Image: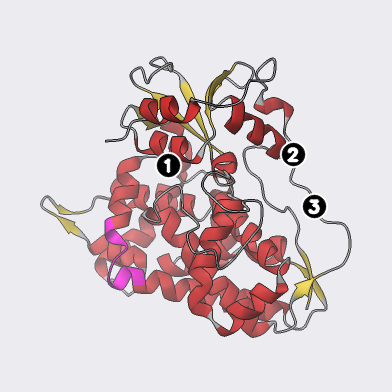
Amino acid sequence: MLCLTDVLVTRTAGTPARPPGPPSLRTAVRDPYPLYRTLRTHYPLVHDEPFGAWLVSRYGDVRAALTDPRLVALPGDGPPEAGRLLDRALRGPALAALTAAVERSAYVLARRLAAREEADLVAEFCDWLPTATAVAALGLPYEETARVHHWCRTGLGHSRGGRSELGAFLRPLTARRRAHPGGDLLSVLCTARTDDGPLPDETVTRLVGALLGAAGETTARALASFLANLLDHPRQLEVLRTRPDLTSGAWAESLRRDPPLHVVLRRAVEPVGAIPAGATVACLFGAAGRDPDRFTDPDRYDAFRPDPGPLAPDTGPGALLARLTAEHGLRALLTALPGLRRAPGARHVPDDLVRRSPRTLPVRI
């Protein structure tokens, strides 16, 4: 297995002389890309004391770090067993229910904008589509959409206190689904069986919490960046209008160039080269996705790039929901709003280093 240490030793050899003093991520909140270039060239592995983590910035190194068993996800990333169970549950009828919910929710939101002259796609489409999908897929009461949206955006579905609140909300719904299951995802979870019998209510709550976490801010931010990239390249957008089968590649390219999370943290459970056990490692997705040693003209968005080289596998409930949201969301917008285009005026500049995406996306309809 290729390990992080091997990659760093190989890639560091022969690099130009370093500039004095390693920089810190904390100095590059508004525009991190010059810093990323410096890190890739001169500091492929460096301890950023102000940020409190070891920085890994090159494409090959980040890929190696994400698969190195000595570097594990932080506890705050959510219960991994829930994600694995939900991943197994989202197959067959459950996947069909989720896909139908994404498609239906996207068209409802898009059609609401059809009579308007202008709209903000972030506030009126991207922020709500993941939540509306979760509500529809799970068969939750429509009037609870705002409450579910709050859980999605604040992460209460993953926290212990939030899980108690979510469990109390789901308890009567779960009881009804166990007695009279339907075709929604909550019914699938309530009727699923293991060797020990049906899933207990606590497990169902964890799975629903994992789905709500997947329907949260990261998915909405990724969708906003995806739509912004295409609206900035209207000719590419027109190709996708007639060739929707190319949308998945356009989505992967947006994740490469403008990932919703620029920094993904890992914890070293044992030493990895110069990294001591217990240290935090920051995998810089924002830097790795624009590594010129891996991608030609890496700063350019090309919806038809032959190999956008995803850093993380397109698996798990979060990746699945995000991809379905992007594909069906774009299709609904192009169908309901054939004249969709960027509105003139100043554009929002992201001001968050870890999570970068447009906060607003004004369009003409």
Other-residue count near label 2 (Cα within 10 Å), few / some / many at <14 / 14–19 / ≥20:
some
Residue 142 falls left or right of residue 121: left
Residue wearing tag 2: 31
Residue 330 in the image, given as x and y percentages of width and height: 59, 73
Q: Is 162 rendered above or below residue 111?
A: above
Do labels 1 and 3 touch, CB within 8 Å? no
Residue 26 in the image, given as x and y percentages of width and height: 69, 26
Q: From which residue to which does the magenta span run? A: 88-95
Q: How many marks?
A: 3
Residue 61 in the image, given as x and y percentages of width and height: 45, 35
The residue depicted at 51 percent of the width and 60 percent of the height is 252
Q: Give whichever of 211, 273 is nearer the camera.
A: 273
Do labels 2 and 1 touch, CB within 8 Å? no
Other-residue count near label 1 (Cα within 10 Å), few / some / many at <14 / 14–19 / ≥20:
some
Query: The disc labelled 2 sits on which kind of residue?
Result: Asp
Task: From the image, state whether disc 2 or disc 3 is nearer to you.
Answer: 2
Q: Is 286 rendered above or below residue 44?
A: below
Q: Residue furthest front?
A: 14
Q: Is 287 rendered above or below residue 234?
A: above
Residue wearing tag 1: 164
Task: From the image, state whether disc 2 or disc 1 is nearer to you.
Answer: 2
* Picture quadrant of residue 10: top left
Q: Give whichever of 306, 240 is nearer the camera.
A: 306
